[in-house]
């Protein structure tokens, strides 16, 4: 069985309230982590995020479910329905919604499942290579994938925060769940985070700071310090959970001769 270590952070940033929420722990079929970023009138985003992560967690704690992509998709859809049921206004600017990203790890089968809706992200760092394994449900990221914008242009685009899907919106959502369990390797590192966490960071910072860290908490400390140092007066709430599989000391951290970290974007949807 692979050794699992988890750490998390959630901070208010420059906002008056924190509308992010997260959960992580161990259930009957392994370890899990869920991160949500809420929005809505009268600060109901916090309620949306709390309801979503609680709902996903409750499904993954159910001893009768199976470790399958279908179960994780069901958990995310259940969270969507939960947020929908608790809407108390027909006015779009007062309705609550949230993004969500979740990972579920079976340490006995050495495999993982993940799913997301919105622009909260999941990164995997393996042997010095950072993969963004989710693709944002946003107008700007769709334009990036179509080759209409560069990532640099996307970072300053006026529509960069406009989502195409979120939990709690009218109608159905289609969670982006991996089709089958993904094999884990000793030394894999996962990072689930809201846009307030990933947006201020140069993606290369993920690999570089990992190489300087000896525990999940230390790594998040280093990343958080970079966000604080940037001192954005409009800094959004920022939250993250990291999962370390085994010990990345020898296999994932950059070696002294790896002077240029490598970043790979998510594959284009089929």
Image (tube, helix red, strand yellow):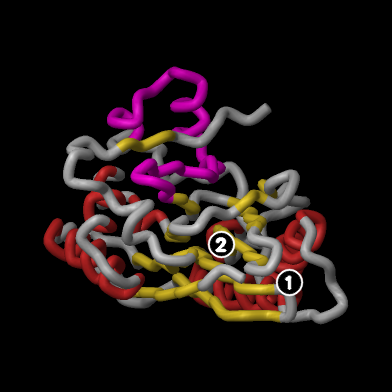
Task: Say what secondary structure mark 1 lies in.
Answer: helix
- Closer to the camera, 197 or 234? 197
| Mark found first going from the N terminus, 2 or 1 | 1
- Closer to the camera, 156 or 32? 32
Q: Residue at x 49, y 55 (%)?
A: 120
Instruction: Determine the CA span between mark 2 and mark 1.
Output: 12 Å
Binning the other alpha carbons within 10 Å of mark 1 as few (below 14), some (14 to 19) or many (20 upward) gives some
Task: Say what secondary structure mark 2 lies in.
Answer: strand
Percent from the top left, x then y, of residue 97?
59, 62
Query: Disc 2 vs disc 1: Cβ atoms closer than 8 Å?
Result: no
Percent from the top left, x then y, of residue 32?
60, 71
- In the image, residue 219 lies in the stretch drawn in magenta: no
Which part of the image, by quadrant, shows the N terminus? bottom right
> Toward which corner of the image does residue 221 lie, by quadrant?
bottom left
Q: Is residue 126 above or below residue 187?
A: above
Residue 172 relative to residue 27: left or right: right
Q: Residue at x 46, y 74 (%)?
A: 5
Q: Residue at x 46, y 50 (%)?
A: 124
Q: Is residue 219 above or below residue 257?
A: below
Percent from the top left, x then y, of residue 172?
77, 51
Q: Which mark is residue 82?
A: 1
Residue matched to label 2: 98
- Closer to the camera, 129 or 177? 129
- Closer to the camera, 114 or 211? 211
Q: Residue at x 43, y 48 (%)?
A: 126
Percent from the top left, x then y, of residue 194?
43, 59
> Toward which corner of the image does residue 64 lie, by quadrant?
bottom right
Residue 113 relative to residue 151: left or right: right
Q: Which residues are magenta?
A: 125-154
Q: Is residue 137 above or below residue 248?
A: above
């Amino acid at each position: 069985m692979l050794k699992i270590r988890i750490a998390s952070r959630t901070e208010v940033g420059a906002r008056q309230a924190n509308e992010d929420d997260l959960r992580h722990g161990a259930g009957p079929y392994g370890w899990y982590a869920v991160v949500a970023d809420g929005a809505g009138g009268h600060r109901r985003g916090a309620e949306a995020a709390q309801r979503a992560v609680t709902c996903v967690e409750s499904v993954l704690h159910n001893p009768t479910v199976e470790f399958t992509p279908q179960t994780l998709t069901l958990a995310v859809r259940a969270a969507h329905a939960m947020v929908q049921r608790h809407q108390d206004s027909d006015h779009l600017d007062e309705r609550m919604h949230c993004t969500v990203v979740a990972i579920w790890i079976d340490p006995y089968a050495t495999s993982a499942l993940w799913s997301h809706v919105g622009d909260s992200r999941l990164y995997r760092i393996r042997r010095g290579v950072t993969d963004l394994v989710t693709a944002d449900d946003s107008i700007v990221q769709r334009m990036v994938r179509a080759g209409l914008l560069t990532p640099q242009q996307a970072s300053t685009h006026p529509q960069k925060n406009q989502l195409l899907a979120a939990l709690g919106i009218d109608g159905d959502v289609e969670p982006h769940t991996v089709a089958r369990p993904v094999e884990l390797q000793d030394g894999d590192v996962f990072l689930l985070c809201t846009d307030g966490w990933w947006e201020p960071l140069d993606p290369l910072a993920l690999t570089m700071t990992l190489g300087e860290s000896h525990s999940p908490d230390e790594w998040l400390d280093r990343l958080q310090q970079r966000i604080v140092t940037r001192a954005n007066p409009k800094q959004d709430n920022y939250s993250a959970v990291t999962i370390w599989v085994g010990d990345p000391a020898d296999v994932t951290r950059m070696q002294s001769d790896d002077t240029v970290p490598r970043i790979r974007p998510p594959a284009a949807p089929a």
